[in-house]
Amino acid sequence: MMDKRISIIGLGMIGGSLAMALKRCAACDMEIVGYARRVETAQEALRLGAVDRVVDTLRDAVEGAAIVVLTTPVVAMQELFKEIRKHLAPGTIVTDVGSTKVDVQRWAKLHLGPNVTFIGGHPMAGSAAAGIGGAKPDLFDDTVFCVVVEEATPEPARAALKQLVEWIGARPLVMTAEQHDQYVAGVSHLPVVLASALVTAAATHEQWPSMSQLAAQGFREMTRMAAGSAEVRRSLCSTNQQAIADWIDRYIQILHDYRTHILQDDSGLLDLFENARLARRHWVETRYKRESP
Amino acid sequence: MMDKRISIIGLGMIGGSLAMALKRCAACDMEIVGYARRVETAQEALRLGAVDRVVDTLRDAVEGAAIVVLTTPVVAMQELFKEIRKHLAPGTIVTDVGSTKVDVQRWAKLHLGPNVTFIGGHPMAGSAAAGIGGAKPDLFDDTVFCVVVEEATPEPARAALKQLVEWIGARPLVMTAEQHDQYVAGVSHLPVVLASALVTAAATHEQWPSMSQLAAQGFREMTRMAAGSAEVRRSLCSTNQQAIADWIDRYIQILHDYRTHILQDDSGLLDLFENARLARRHWVETRYKRESP
């Protein structure tokens, strides 16, 4: 028992929740070790029972671990790979929870060396809460967890990550890094850009001072994603530039299509609205099990 | 007292709420008369105390009224103008609550004749509830009510509509029909098109079956406006075609701008996001008095 170890690097909301979810799982027979740059964070994780044990150095965290999970933001990943490389034992599986995958996979290949296996991960779960204080063991329950592979990814690494995903209560969905980044560009990054662009289009209009008094609930909802940090939005775009640009192109084509049918006021417009309504309803019913829209 | 009459044609959610708000207002010294095509609706309005009196015919409703308020949908307005024309006494003020104004104003000029004054209205208040059962006296409290004029609109008509708007607890905002339709195209109709177009772009992608499993709360919120009736959306577009098309053009220009800066990953991208964030925050704070985003 407990002869194998999962080391979680970074004990924020995601890292902390991951640790708690593993601790909660009776089937998980591995020791959960945590590392955070700030001693206070590590101590708090220990106090909350999120981990079995904390360590003071990256070296102690990764050396001899069966699985290392990096939960730091994508932008910090490259440096982290360089730091941990020399401490990783041959055969260790390294994974991450970053929100884009092509860059991370390329950096892993570049910096981790051939004796360890990198396999990317991305839990489709989030929360407005931040830090270890916002962590909770059920964060991943019934959510999708992307398991990001390439052809060369060995079967034991795939099996180990799928196992870990099931331990935390999530559902593994296997895809390539390119697929992943294209998908999240469409369903997550594009909506962020669209929301900001709507504010820009409206608020830079010379009549905005009058017009803004007519804006109501619909405008508010369609721009809510423009409300957060500009820095976060920029770095989200910077790790997925081409995929987002491709989705903007696709979206503009669709908008041209709507525009044409609006000016013609024809049945094609009705079809566009109706097909969108039905597709969304199908998605909501499948994903949220018949909750209201 | 009560020698002057306001007749409300149509006793749905908006018409019923308007009647109730006038009845609630101590300063309003006019009789509130209601007319609905369905006898049951009129009786229910009477039972709810929404109106002082109901009448059985359009003729009885408009003949001798000081103010006639049409609360039927825009698409029904042209026929209604033709029907009421012969019963309107000289000097009557006719207004409406339709959601677009250029068409309605043109039809009024075409069909109502020179002896009555038409002045358009549009309350920026709504509710998911429909029908007289969804009507409530406080629907317009602290909302903006567009008073739609042209140069030739006589001062007494402007004063009368502004008075009515204040009686129902709303704030009159005076503008032309062209301004109105351009404003609502930007803050209300464009968002509807954007939401549907996002569903179309995603759900017609060949990878949608996989991708849809990654879509979450942000996608759901950005597409909620695509959930309603396609017929309603089409007729909304059909009365405001050019203004919506112009806003789509403007929006596409802005999207191109975002796209360029995303590929350059430059400070211009940060500025776009940050200016959008600040503009939205200012709007939310002004309009919703510091409620959360």
Image: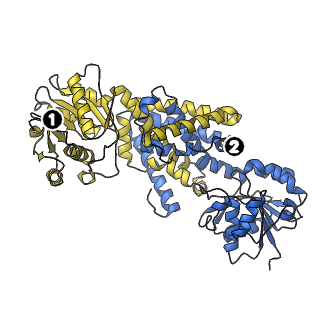
Chain colours: A yellow, B blue
Choose between B83 and A261: the one closer to the eye: B83
Foreground disc of the pair 1, 2? 2
- Which residue is tagged 1? A83
Q: Neighbour class for label 2 at 10 Å: few (<14), some, many (≥20)?
A: some
Q: Are marks 1 and 2 in contact (CB under 8 Å)?
A: no
Task: Give the answer, above or below, for where B91 lies relative to B252.
Answer: below
Q: Position of residue B269 (x, y in %)?
A: 42, 40
Identify the chain of the residue marked 1, using the numbered disc in the image. A
Determine which quarter of the picture holds residue A82: top left
User: Is residue B275 something that shows in the picture?
Assistant: no
Horizontal arrangement in the rendering, residue B169 relative to residue A23 (left or right):
right
Identify the chain of the residue marked 2, using the numbered disc in the image. B
- Which residue is tagged 2? B235
Q: Position of residue B214 (x, y in %)?
A: 40, 36
Task: Give the answer, above or below, for where A61 lies relative to A229.
Answer: above
User: Is residue A264 something that shows in the picture?
Assistant: yes
